[in-house]
Amino acid sequence: MELQWLVLVAIILSTILWTEIRLSGKAQSRRLQRAYRESFSLESNPHNQIIMTLLNTLFEKNPREEQHSERVAELCVLIGKSLGLNREQLEELKLTGLLHDIGKIVVDEAILNKATNLDEREWKHIQRHPVVGYRLLNFVPGMSSVAAAILAHHERWDGTGYPRGLKGEEIPVNARIVAVADAYDAMVSFRPYRNSLTHEEAVEELQQRSGTQFDPRIIQAFVTDVAKEKALDGVSRQRVYYAFQEPVYAHLVVE
């Protein structure tokens, strides 16, 4: 098992070097850099370039992941504010939302871009991404709590999630927040194999899964404050969500 991870790390580091060479002389995504700077102080993490390179590698591989990650980060902050988190907590939460799918850097593009439901083998491959993300970020000093939340963002409140089957408050709170934001964005985003849900339908789906898939307190915060803000945004906001295609998950709600 350790040998497998050593090989994985070698591949990732090689990918980083190759990406840095290829991006030399080019402007990296200004939007990505802005989102990263706003979510975490560059000065507080001297290894930020590693994270930036990993993000650029994933987002160049699949631009939809950049759009998805930014929207999830935005939703996470809205939920965090509703829960009364302080500025420092919100910064870490936003960074967690931005990085939550970084482990997909090792997922085959054919799987990420598949226009039909994933088969069992492909689904198992996708399910590796929280562990990969955790392992990658654990190499970066000062990122342990972010890494722990990313590892757990597909755990479920009732203990039937993955990769460790954590239950209830065993799951880091930031992971529980990301889970709700991730699921909402997945539902209101277009899929080639199904229609996107409306804002109201997605909220109803989240409420139905409160206490099973999701933390009831976070669902309440979402419905009370975030959902109202999204509803006020109305059609213009939903058009933005519908414009992006993210054919990744086989299930309606991210699991």
Image (cartoon, helix red, strand yellow):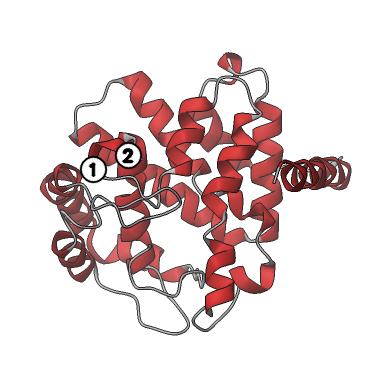
Residue 31 visible here: no
Which of the 4 image quadrants contains residue 231? bottom left
Callout 1: few (<14), some (14-19), or many (20+) C-alpha neighbours within 10 Å? Answer: some
- Observer-nearest residue: 248 or 56? 248
Q: Secondary structure at mark 2?
A: loop
Q: Is residue 59 above or below residue 26?
A: below
CB-based contact (under 8 Å), mark 1 and mark 2: yes
- Observer-nearest residue: 170 or 39? 170
* Disc 1: which residue: 168
Give me the residue at 20% from left, 44% from top: 218
Where is residue 35 shown, x and y percent of the image? Answer: 51, 37
Label drawn at residue 80: none
232 with respect to 194 (left or right): left
Callout 2: few (<14), some (14-19), or many (20+) C-alpha neighbours within 10 Å? Answer: many
Q: Is residue 234 above or below residue 142?
A: below
Residue farthest to the front?
1
Could you tell me how many numbered marks the image carries?
Answer: 2
Real-space CA distance between mark 1 and mark 2, rounded to the nearest whole angstrom: 6 Å
Residue 254 visible here: yes
> What type is the residue that disc 2 sits on?
Ile
Point out the image quarter for the C terminus.
bottom left
73 with respect to 133 (left or right): left
- Observer-nearest residue: 255 or 187? 255
* Disc 2: which residue: 171
Which of the 4 image quadrants contains residue 186? bottom left
Where is residue 38 shown, x and y percent of the image? Answer: 48, 29
> What type is the residue that disc 1 sits on?
Gly
Give me the residue at 59% from left, 21% from top: 42
66 with respect to 196 (left or right): right
Which of the 4 image quadrants contains residue 212? bottom left
